[in-house]
Amino acid sequence: MLTQTIEQEIVPRLVLARSAASGRPLLPPPGTAPVLAGEVDELARLATGRDPGAARSFVAAVLARGTTMEALFLDLLAPAARRLGDLWSEDLCDFTQVTMAVWCLSELLRETGNDLPDPLLRRENDRHVLLVPVPGEQHTFGLAMVASFFRRSGWTVWSEPLACSNDLVGIVRSEWFSVIGFSLSSTSRLEALATHIRRVRRASRNPAVGILVGGPIFVERPELVVMVGADATAIDGRQATFQAESLVALRATSD
């Protein structure tokens, strides 16, 4: 029994976790324009200003020269959000400035995400994913970006902050999900995350639900993925969709 558990559960989780931690970004399509040096800092500066229209115009100019939406998300918006965190840590911006700047980036993410065309190839109807921060987690910008990638890949996405663990259990009891994703930014909530994962596995309408976890702590220490009882992690939204598809395929082959 122990050997079977290691082969069918632990090893696949470690493989998926390691592949996420060591993954390399794909090369952009020929003829597309990359995000340029200095543009991340410039967007962070504009986001902290008093004119949100300046940041919106800046992003529009980046897209107009041929930068892909994927590059905009992964190479500009996400690094700009991390840069805002650095500015706060270095006492170069106060809490209010950073909060308003992250709100500005979130609006840009929402607006540009809405401009994406519907996927040309829709996935099967069972591609339902629940993406939530660990209850009490305040950092949700990265999760919103991951949700955009899932929608673009044809998944039906549920992504709303939850007030408590009971809300989470209630949702997974009433709705069917093939994958549930949690975001976490601090090691202080690792034990709480493990508890939430155990509860949703027991309560889930899908007994084979896949569990994804995200956040820099899992990229730096992929062994934590198994420790909290999850199946995989990912370094960004693009890889999160790949990992989710891999989990669904893994479950299908074991049925």
Image (cartoon, grey):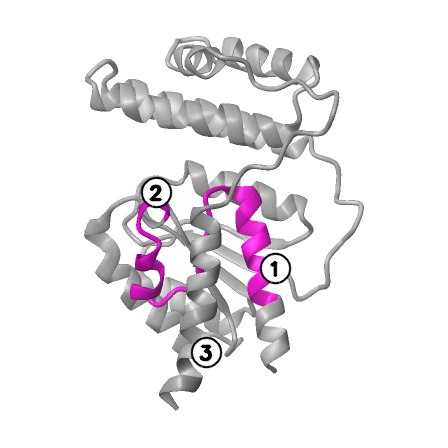
What residue is at 65 percent from the left and 33 percent from the top? 114
189 to the left or right of 64: left
Which of the two marks, 3 or 1, is nearer to us in this view?
Answer: 3
Q: Please tell me which of labels 3 and 1 falls first in the chain.
A: 3
Instruction: Confirm whether the magenta stretch covers residue 122.
Output: no
Mark 1 Cα-neighbour bin, 10 Å: few <14, some 14–19, many ≥20 = some
For disc 3, the marked residue is 7
What residue is at 63 percent from the left and 76 percent from the top? 253
Q: Please tell me which of labels 1 and 2 falls first in the chain.
A: 2
Measured as percent of width and height from the top left, residue 34 is found at 61, 19
Residue 216 has which mark?
2
Instruction: Confirm whether the magenta stretch covers residue 227.
Output: yes
Residue closest to the eye, 6 or 168: 6
44 to the left or right of 99: right
| Mark 2: amino acid | Pro
Measured as percent of width and height from the top left, residue 59 is found at 57, 16
Q: Is residue 192 above or below residue 39?
A: below
| Mark 3: amino acid | Glu
Residue 245 has which mark?
1
